Image (spheres, rainbow, N blue to C red):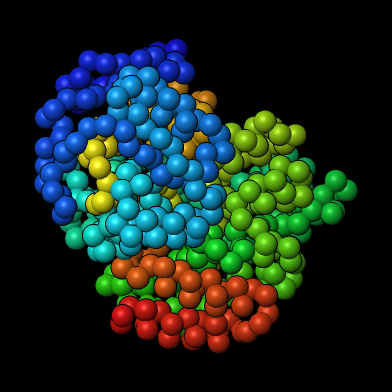
Amino acid sequence: MKTTTITALPCSAALVAAGLLLTACSSADTGSGQTGSGSFEGRGPITYVAGKDTTGNTQTIIDHWNKLHPKEKVTFIQLPTDADSQRQQMIQNAETKSDAYTVLSLDVVWTSEFAAHKWIDKLPEKQFPLDKMLKPVVDTAKYRDGLYAAPAASDGGMLYYRTDLLKKAGITQPPTTWTEMKTACAKVKKLPQAKDMSCYAGQFQKYEGLTVNFAEAVNSAGGTVTDDFGEPNVDTAEAKKGLDFLVDSVKDRTIPKEAVTYQEEEGRKEFQDGKLIFLRNWPYVYSLAAKSDIKGKYAVAPLPGLNGPGSSSLGGHNLALSSFAKNKATALDFMTFFTSEESADYFLKKSSLAPPYAHLYDDASLVKQYPYLPVLKESIERAMPRPRVVQYGDMTSAVQQQVYAALTGDRSSAQALKDLQAALQKSVAQ
């Protein structure tokens, strides 16, 4: 397998890992630069804090760093898999000004909140090759024109679909609209092997995934959750069309009733077990499905929308440096190492994680091996960010409460959006 080297950093220590040449640096000049809590000083052990590593690949990267830096080892602190619990524990650590957490793996939408509260340090932009990264991804790492995180992995929602069943039903192209998807489902379900299958699912449990799926529905109907100035904008005809798609789909069983309990993994397993024709999910599903019984029987397409292709919510994770951490010089070097092009290539090949680096999506050899890359790039470039507001926790909590109530029939779409508008305005005013 071809190996590559990093030329952006003046360091010499390197190792071959899983066919990739990863370079890790420990030079004095990388510790320069001012932050809100001082300079990047201090070398020694640090921690890396992220959601549970279900693949083992994150630990592999950390192990390689530790092998090269026995006096600056990284301890991996794994938090729960759901984003809400991760955010809560990181905030608790910050509010106590604890140095237990050093490098944080933040959901891309948390940057503004953590930066505004001075829980993370401003970073030196020259430390990271931002010019090689997709602009929407870089934008998620900034707050008030300053860089407060380093893009590690992006994410875009895609529509997984059963190519074998669509072909048998005489459907030659994946749907681009919600109506086309429902029509395709009706045709597929006439097949003997598909009569007990459900049509479509996403992430509809009351957690961050519901905020993502709601925002996608609203954006894909021409609406927006907040405007460019962060002002709530959900009590609109466009937002209602988006929410109505979800609510009506539960009512007519396009979305199975049990999908209101689905996070990412529940939907993935249902799709792999042959119980779903269509699934909205992230790129990590692609490599896992290739190891299941539906290998060779599925593909991906852009998310459908009201009148044409829809818009994904922009996902992914960025690395940030806790303002209360010790050994920040080591931390900055580790962040550079972990977010390097070589690391991104490794995570793409091992975990189907969307890289922040633009050229990897156009690499012919990679596209041949990972045919979803062009769709994923389109998804990211068309993606709409979730509201980047300082009080993000209040915002997402309000969305989850009102949207879940509409999905489960506790209130109408119109009432849910009216109540949500009021709750979001209250949150923004704080």
Left or right, 368 with respect to 30, comes to right
- Whether residue 430 is visible, yes or no, is yes
Tell me which residue sits at (51%, 35%) in the image: 352
Tell which of 430 and 172 is nearer to you. Answer: 430
Q: Is residue 157 above or below residue 164?
A: below
Tell me which residue sits at (17%, 25%) in the image: 27
Tell me which residue sits at (62%, 63%) in the image: 205
Tell me which residue sits at (46%, 69%) in the image: 396
Q: In which quadrant is the N terminus drawn? A: top left
Count of labels in the image: 0
Residue 253, position as x, y percentages in the image:
75, 66
Q: Which residue sits furthest right?
A: 192
- Whether residue 138 is visible, yes or no, is no
- Location of residue 245 by image quarter: bottom right
Tell which of 118 and 199 is nearer to you. Answer: 118
Q: Is residue 68 above or below residue 424?
A: above
Tell which of 391 and 212 is nearer to you. Answer: 391
Q: In which quadrant is the C terminus drawn? A: bottom left
Left or right, 223 with respect to 184, comes to left
Q: Is residue 17 above or below residue 249?
A: above
Residue 236, position as x, y percentages in the image:
45, 82
Q: Is residue 6 above or below residue 84?
A: above
Residue 264, position as x, y percentages in the image:
60, 51
Residue 174, position as x, y percentages in the image:
61, 49
